[in-house]
Image (spheres, rainbow, N blue to C red):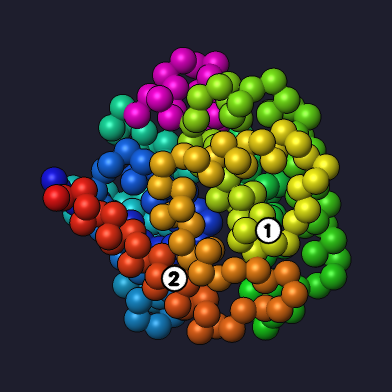
């Protein structure tokens, strides 16, 4: 099998995990190139070589080694991959169902994504000194988004868009799921029974554990911020597990 697609990023990154999960779920081989987010050093997302291909300097980004095609932004990448490989089960061809998936993906950025920006990042990166007003706004955005998902998206269906898994669920879970007590333990889902049921269902999706290896390694951050060495090691372990899965595809 050819691994002509390169995915740039690190396993600890939520958007990167969503793309990696999609590829493993579909048993599509790829090459994972570790890129240090925000770094201008060699191998970093702000290094001139990386910026020459990906001007926004973000991860995940992908590159097709055969055609030279490059693309950034996880949702754009996931939609592109589903279109390219006809993965209609995860990105339905039905216009109304696809529009619902797209609707969630658009909602995600300044709502559910705040789970990482406002709840996880401040505990992992104490050096960033997030303003208190910013943290309060992020918490409010997350609470509002979770209520909408609880009372709307998941109130009458197993998954976000009906009773079948889609890329909307994968994108949502890497953000929401990371907050659980078995991972970072920074959010109490007691008030959201539908979300709790969905979290359990998502934990049974193939490659869930492998994709979230870095989070299992990092552990509870609710009391004490992890040392940078622990974050680095969590990424390394996540990378190793993904490489093992890719090797098993070839056997």
Mark 1 is surrounded, within 10 Å at the Cα level, by few (under 14), some (14 to 19) or many (20 or more) other residues, namely: some
Disc 1 element: loop
Q: Position of residue 116 (x, y in %)?
A: 64, 59
Locate residue 113 relative to residue 78 in the image: left or right. right
First along the sequence among labels 1 and 2: 1
| Residue carrying label 1 | 181
On residue 235, which mark appears? 2
Residue closer to the observer: 142 or 65: 142
Q: How many angstroms separate mark 1 from mark 2 (CA)?
A: 20 Å
Residue 81 position in % (x across, y down): 34, 38
Judge whether residue 97 is colored magenta. yes
Query: Based on the displayed image, in which of its 4 quarters is residue 87 positioned?
Result: top left
Query: Can residue 45 be seen in the rendering of this structure?
Result: no
Kindly identify the residue that appears in the image at 68 percent across and 29 percent down.
154
Please state which of the two labelled residues, at mark 1 or mark 2, is closer to the viewer: 1
Residue at 44% across, 22% down? 92
Where residue 90 sits: x, y (%)? 43, 30
Q: Is residue 54 above or below residue 39?
A: above
Q: Residue at x 27, y 60 (%)?
A: 244
**Who is closer to the viewer here, 14 or 100?**
14
Tell me the SS state at disc 2: helix
Tell me which corner region of the image, top left, top right, bottom left or bottom right, holds residue 57. Answer: bottom left
Q: Which residues are magenta?
A: 87-102
- Please name whichever residue, 251 or 126, is drawn nearer the observer in this view of the structure: 251
Magenta includes 8?
Answer: no
Residue at horizontal 64%, vertical 22%?
157
Task: Residue 61: name its quadrant.
Answer: bottom left
Classify 156 as above or below 187. above
Callout 2: 10 Å neighbours few (<14), some, many (20+)? many
Q: Is residue 199 left or right of residue 71?
A: right
């Amino acid at each position: 099998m050819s691994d002509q697609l390169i995915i740039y990023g690190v396993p600890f990154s939520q958007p990167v995990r969503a793309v990696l999960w999609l590829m493993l779920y579909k048993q599509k081989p790829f090459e994972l190139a570790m890129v240090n987010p925000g770094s201008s050093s060699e191998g970093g997302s702000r290094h001139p070589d990386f910026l020459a291909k990906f001007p926004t300097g973000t991860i995940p980004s992908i590159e097709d080694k055969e055609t030279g095609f490059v693309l950034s932004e996880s949702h754009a990448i996931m939609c592109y991959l589903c279109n390219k490989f006809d993965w209609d089960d995860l990105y339905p061809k039905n216009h109304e169902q696809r529009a619902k998936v797209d609707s969630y993906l658009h909602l995600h950025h300044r709502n559910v994504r705040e789970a990482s920006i406002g709840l996880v990042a401040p505990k992992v990166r104490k050096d960033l000194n997030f303003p208190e007003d910013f943290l309060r706004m992020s918490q409010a955005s997350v609470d509002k988004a979770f209520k909408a998902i609880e009372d709307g998206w998941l109130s009458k269906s197993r998954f976000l868009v009906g009773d079948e898994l889609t890329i909307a669920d994968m994108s949502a879970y890497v953000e929401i799921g990371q907050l659980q007590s078995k991972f970072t333990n920074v959010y109490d889902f007691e008030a959201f029974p539908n979300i709790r049921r969905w979290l359990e269902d998502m934990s049974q999706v193939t490659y869930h554990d492998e994709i979230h290896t870095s989070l299992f390694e990092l552990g509870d951050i609710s009391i004490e911020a992890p040392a940078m060495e622990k974050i680095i090691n969590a990424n390394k372990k996540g990378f190793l597990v993904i490489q093992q899965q890719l090797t098993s595809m070839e056997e």
